[in-house]
Image: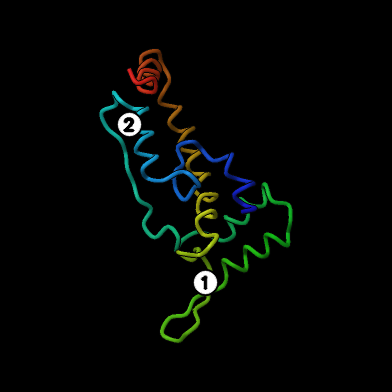
């Protein structure tokens, strides 16, 4: 709840993953309402995403907005908890437990950097009179 309070307002409005009041259905509705004249979209999946979250990168991202080192240590302990398989304990050096209570918000915080990069990258294609007008038409539903 603390992380959600800190971060939720800063996420992109196009981010629908693991957020209160948002889902794949709200994402589809946003696409339907915003992009009525667009011809194609790019969809992707990050294979093994939860298994490959870099702990140091995530803590560095969190440290930009969270100043409480005890809280950050608690999150690192969650990330380093490890797992049991065939009665054997395995340490974890990367990733977040799928199904873990804070894994979804940590994933959103981690992927928010990607969302912001893609928004900035997309803006580079909106230059010029013709392209800019087309984007406005798509967003206004014309």
- Left or right position of 122 against 59: left
Residue at position x 53%, y 74% in the image: 82
Give percent across and percent down for residue 25. 36, 42
- Left or right position of 142 against 19: left
User: Which residue lies under the disc numbered 1?
Assistant: 92
Give percent across and percent down for residue 47. 36, 57
Looking at this view, name the residue that lies furthest to the left. 39
Give percent across and percent down for residue 115. 48, 41
Residue at position x 36%, y 14% in the image: 130
Secondary structure, mark 2, is helix
Residue at position x 54%, y 55% in the image: 106
Figure quadrant of the N terminus: bottom right
Establish if 89 lies above or below 105: below
Q: Which mark is residue 11?
A: none
Q: In terms of depth relative to the viewer, which is nearer, 58 or 24?
A: 24
Establish if 90 lies above or below 25: below
Q: What is the basis of the colouring in this image?
A: rainbow
User: Which residue lies under the disc numbered 2?
Assistant: 32
Numbered-mark total: 2
Establish if 18 lies above or below 70: above
User: Which tag is nearer the camera, tag 2 or tag 1?
Assistant: 2
Q: In terms of depth relative to the viewer, which is nearer, 59 or 17?
A: 17
Whichever of labels 2 and 1 marks the residue nearer the N terminus, that label is 2
Q: CA distance from mark 2 to mark 1?
A: 41 Å
Figure quadrant of the C terminus: top left
Mark 2, Cα crowd under 10 Å, few <14 / some 14-19 / many 20+, is few
């Amino acid at each position: 709840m603390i992380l959600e309070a800190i971060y939720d307002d800063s996420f992109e409005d196009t981010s629908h993953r693991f957020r209160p009041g948002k889902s794949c259905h709200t994402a589809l509705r946003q696409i339907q309402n915003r992009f009525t004249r667009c011809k194609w979209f790019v969809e992707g999946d990050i294979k093994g995403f939860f298994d490959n979250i870099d702990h140091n990168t995530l803590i560095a991202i969190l440290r930009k907005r969270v100043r409480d080192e005890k809280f950050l240590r608690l999150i690192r302990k969650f990330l380093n908890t490890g797992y049991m398989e065939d009665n054997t304990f395995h340490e974890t050096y990367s990733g977040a437990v799928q199904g873990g209570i804070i894994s979804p918000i940590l994933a959103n915080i981690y992927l928010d950097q990607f969302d912001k990069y893609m928004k900035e990258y997309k803006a580079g294609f909106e230059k010029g009179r013709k392209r800019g007008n087309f984007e406005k038409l798509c967003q206004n539903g014309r």
